[in-house]
Amino acid sequence: MSAIKYKVNLTDDEKLHLEALLQKGKSAARSQTQARILLKSAGGLQDKDIINALDVSPSVVAKTRQRCVEEGPEDALSYASSFSHEAVCQRLKKHIESLAKAGVVYSRGQFRIRGRHGRRVGLLRRAL
């Protein structure tokens, strides 16, 4: 049995806050899953038991534990995507460029495929 690298210790107030978040049911599914992970971790469950109980990947459990220990339980729940705005814009730009090279054009709410001489070859209806 491997030792837990990040041991989650929650105060009574933090546990009550997480339980209230789950009972309310108006938060995002990701936040609810992270709250369940933190409560089960604080209860002493091993990662494999949490993974099986919540049907999540090992990395989700590990990262949630790590953020809770390093930044606190509130920050672990409000963790944003790891992609920066610039990285997302850069990926979208590359994707649009590759579609343009393939001859796909977006016009009037539809994706159109252009042939070698600019003639319309086909139409993709709401493919994305």
Image: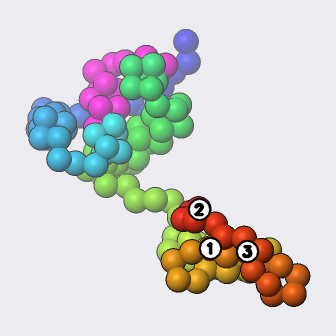
Pointer 3: residues within 10 angstroms few (<14), some, or many (20+)?
some
Name the residue tied to disc 1.
111
> What residue do we see at 72% from left, 70% from top?
122
The spot of residue 97 in percent (x, y) is 72, 80
Residue type for callout 3: Ile
Residue type for callout 1: Phe
The spot of residue 45 in percent (x, y) is 37, 18
> What residue do we see at 53% from left, 83% from top?
108
Q: Does residue 118 belong to the magenta stretch?
A: no
Quarter occupied by the N terminus = top right
Task: Report whether 33 appears left or right of 110.
Answer: left
Return the residue nearer the eye: 75 or 83. Answer: 83
Question: In the rendered structure, which disc, 2 or 3, sits on the residue that comes first in sequence?
Answer: 3
Task: Report whether 82 appears left or right of 79.
Answer: right
Measure how far apart labels 3 and 1 are at the Cα level.
7 Å
Name the residue tied to disc 3.
113
Give the residue at the far top of this rendering: 1
Pointer 2: residues within 10 angstroms few (<14), some, or many (20+)?
few
Task: Report whether 55 appears left or right of 115.
Answer: left
Quarter occupied by the C terminus = bottom right
What is the span of residues highlighted in magenta in the rendered image? 35-49
For residue 103, what is the image quadrant? bottom right
Element class at badge 1: strand
For residue 34, what is the image quadrant? top left
Question: In the rendered structure, which disc, 1 or 2, sits on the residue that comes first in sequence?
Answer: 1
Measure how far apart labels 2 and 3 are at the Cα level.
12 Å
The spot of residue 22 in percent (x, y) is 19, 36
Label 3–label 1 contact, CB within 8 A:
yes
Kindly identify which numbered label has been placed on residue 127: 2
Element class at badge 2: loop
Return the residue nearer the eye: 23 or 65. Answer: 23
Return the residue nearer the eye: 6 or 93. Answer: 93
